[in-house]
Amino acid sequence: MSDYPLYFDSFDYAQMLADYPLGRGFAEGFAVLSRDEIRARQEAQFQRCVARAWEVPFYQRLWGEAGATPGDIRSLDDLPRLPIFSKNDLMASVAASPPFGDYHGWEKWPAQNRPVVVMQTTSGTTGQPQPLFFSAKSREVQALLVGRAYGLQGLRPAEVVHSVYGHGMINGGHYVREAVLHYTNAIFLSAGTGVETRSRQQVELMRTFGVNVIVGFVDYIKRLADVAAELGIEPGKDIPIRMISGHIGRESRQQIAAAWGGAEVYDWYGVGDTGLIATEAADQDGMYVMEDAQLAEICDTETNAVLEDSSPGNLIVTCLYKDDVYPIIRFNTKDLSAWRRGASSLGFNLKRIEGFLGRSDNMVKIRGINIYPQALGPVLAEDPAFAGEFICRVRRDATGRDDLEVLVEVADGDAGGVAERIATLLRQRLGLKMTVTAHAPGALKALTQVETRQKPIRLLDERNLQ
């Protein structure tokens, strides 16, 4: 035995599996508890998280500045009294206490007794990458939740799963790999992005090893279908994909399914700091919040007031399983979502969200109208010429007037005035006149970086460059 904690010695693995069950243990256990029973379990976890957070310098400062004291938060009813924080606050912590910040809270332990810490970073798509920290326990819970999601979506024993999540310092590819290897019995191909494994090679690997499930961001999954067709390989037949589990957001589910021969397509949602928050299940009727591990709020983007109706707002998350390293209480993802109402056909008593509706910090206001670039995808998909990729460019002319140009990949160039037709469609749906330019399939990949990024670029705001 080492003189310092080892990974599986640093927490009670059997207790973790009991606290966060898989398969029937979840679907016939926690998911069907009454709302009062769910609340009671959350209360016990929440109090542990709050007690731990008061030991962390980041929270001592954040909550102290808001006038909170340790005795103020007695139950979940008091949660709205605590301030919401975002990545901006975490990066300020890193700047003040480089290189890791002071939100992890490992000052509690001498170095030789510190629990095992897994460090990853965010992708840095909105700036400098942010350090992410997980204890061994929270890392396993994070992976388990993804494995649970795949099970709820219908992943079958011994299926061959092809993952296009990126690796390196980014969190996603690693914990998805751990999810499949530790919490399913599927065979896993960890291909990564088109930079890590060339797209043509990925397609050949999928055919060679009989892949029938693809996981990852759907933009690149669609791109792989195009590459397969270019190689004379028929998606869905030569590579018989049965199931796709990714991050659909506002993309067309039907278009993704059709690209792979009619595969079943499932969505799930999470961010790097929190791990998986909610997932679709077999009923594909909204995303079930994993309420034994995550507590979700939806708040007004301007006032931070908690929204109880079905209005869209920022998704705010408290991780009930992170009571050791880097506790997370009221983290503003700045992703927009809304509550899904109505009874679950599966009999689950879990809350549901609509999924990813856009970024509140990636909104542009053009002549008084708020435009979320991700929201254009479903509208564009209404036109049969749309080939699946687009990007928005905002420019300001000499008079100070802002213009939104939408660059769209279309199947047959601008044949038949497709650009004008799409411009009319966007104006009708969104109430704003936009400039649309048509481009050949694949022409925008240098701008969207669909083959190299976890999430393709959808907005180029060039107003400050002019």
Image: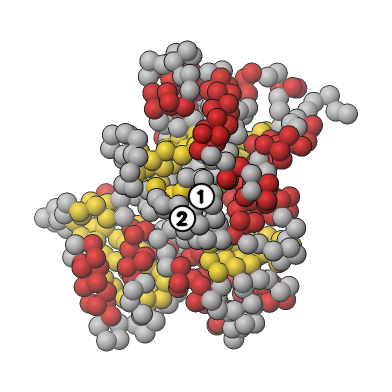
Is residue 118 in sight in this rendering? Answer: no
Q: Residue at x 20, y 68 (%)?
A: 428
Q: Nearer the viewer, residue 275 or 33?
A: 33
The answer to whether 336 appears left or right of 209 in the picture is left
Judged from the image, the secondary structure of the residue bearing numbered disc 2 is loop
Q: Residues within 10 Å of mark 2 (few under 14, many from 20)?
A: many
Apparent side of residue 157 relative to residue 356 in the rendered image (left or right):
right
Residue 240 shows in the view: yes
Determine which of the numbered discs, if any, sits on residue 288 in the image: 1
Closer to us: 404 or 288 = 288
Q: Is residue 356 above or below residue 3?
A: below
Q: Quadrant of the N terminus?
A: top right
Q: Which mark is residue 286?
A: 2
Residue extending furthest toward the left: 399
Image coordinates of residue 160 in percent, x first then y, are 71, 67
Figure check: 227 above or below 461 = below
Spot occupied by residue 123 in the image (x, y as percentages of width and height) = 52, 48
| Residue 402 x %, y % | 19, 56
Amino acid type assigned to the residue bearing label 2 in the image = Gly
Badge 1 amino acid: Tyr
Quarter location, residue 151: bottom right
**What number is the disc on residue 111?**
none
In this rendering, is residue 388 above or below 2?
A: below
**What residue is at 41 percent from the left and 42 percent from the top?**
315
Task: Provide residue 298's location: percent of width, then percent of height.
Answer: 38, 40
Tag 1 near tag 2, CB within 8 Å: yes
Q: Residue at x 42, y 38 (%)?
A: 297
Give the residue drawn at x 44%, y 49%: 353
Neighbourhood count class around disc 1 (C-alpha, 10 Å): few under 14, some 14–19, many 20 upward: many
